[in-house]
Image: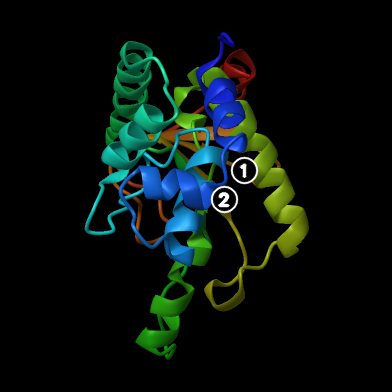
Amino acid sequence: MIDNFKTDLVVRAAAIPQEELLKAMGYQKPTSANLERLQNVLESSEFGLNESGFDFKFSSEGFLRALCVVLGMDMALTDQRITRLQKRLAEEKSAFKPYLWVDTGFTRKSQPLFALAVCEHQRYLHFSKGFWRMPLDRQLGRAQCTVREHVYETGRTLGIWGEIKQYWFYYEKDAAYLLARNGEVIGKREGAVPSRAELSPNLNAISPVTRETQQ
C-alpha cells in the first residue's frame, strides 16, 4: 500500500471507471453532478470536506467514507485523516482572519448610499488562506508588502473613496497597526475599524525610534 492517503485514494480510483465507482457507492444512475462531485473530491486537498455538499444521499463526510469503502481503503487511516481535516477546517472557520483596511479619510457628501455599498469591498484587502497561522512578524511583513503593491496598483486613489491616506492592518479583531503608504508602521490602535481618518484616544502614535525597533 502506498504510504500516502491522497495518492493511494487517487491511484485506486483511477483504476475504476468513475460511473462504476458511483454505482458501487449507491448511485444507480450517476448524473453529471455526481461525476463532478467525485472529481472535485479526488482533486481537493481537503477531499470536499470544506464544502457543504449534499445530494440527498451523502453529506461531504459520508461521500468520502463511501468512496473509501468502495476503494478498499484502510478505514482506520481514513477515520484518522477525516478527524485531522475536520479539526483543521474547524480552526480555519473559527479563527480571526487578518486583513487590511484602506483609510482614505472619506466623509460622505452627495455620494449615493447604494454606490457606497457596492464599493465597500474596495476598502478591505484580504490575505490568502492560512495566513492567520503565520507568526505576527511575518504577517506584518506581508501586510507591508501588500500595502506597497496596492499603492502602486491604485496610484494612491481608491475610486469613490478618494485618495488613500494610510492603511490599518487588523491582526486581531480589535487591534491593528497603522501603516503609511510606503508600508512603514506609524501607529497602533485598539478598537474597531475607524469610520473616519482621524486620530482618537485609542490611537497611539509611534515615535521614529520605536518604529525602527519594531521593524
Q: Nearer the viewer, residue 29 or 37?
A: 29
Q: Nearer the viewer, residue 123 or 71?
A: 71
Residue 183 in the image, given as x and y percentages of width and height: 66, 38
Which residue is tagged 2?
166
Q: Is residue 122 above or below residue 73?
A: below
In the rendered structure, find residue 112 and report the number of the disc placed on it.
Answer: none
Q: Amino acid at mark 1?
A: Ala
Residue 188 in the image, given as x and y percentages of width and height: 43, 33
Q: What is the residue that sits farthest to the left in this orientation?
A: 56
Q: CA distance from mark 2 to mark 1?
A: 5 Å
Q: Residue 158, can we see it? A: yes
Q: Amino acid at mark 2?
A: Gln
Query: What residue do we see at 35% from left, 54% from top?
Result: 194
Which residue is tagged 1?
180
Marks 2 and 1 close (CB-CB < 8 Å): yes
Query: What residue do we see at 61% from left, 68% from top?
Result: 158
Q: Quadrant of the C terminus?
A: top right
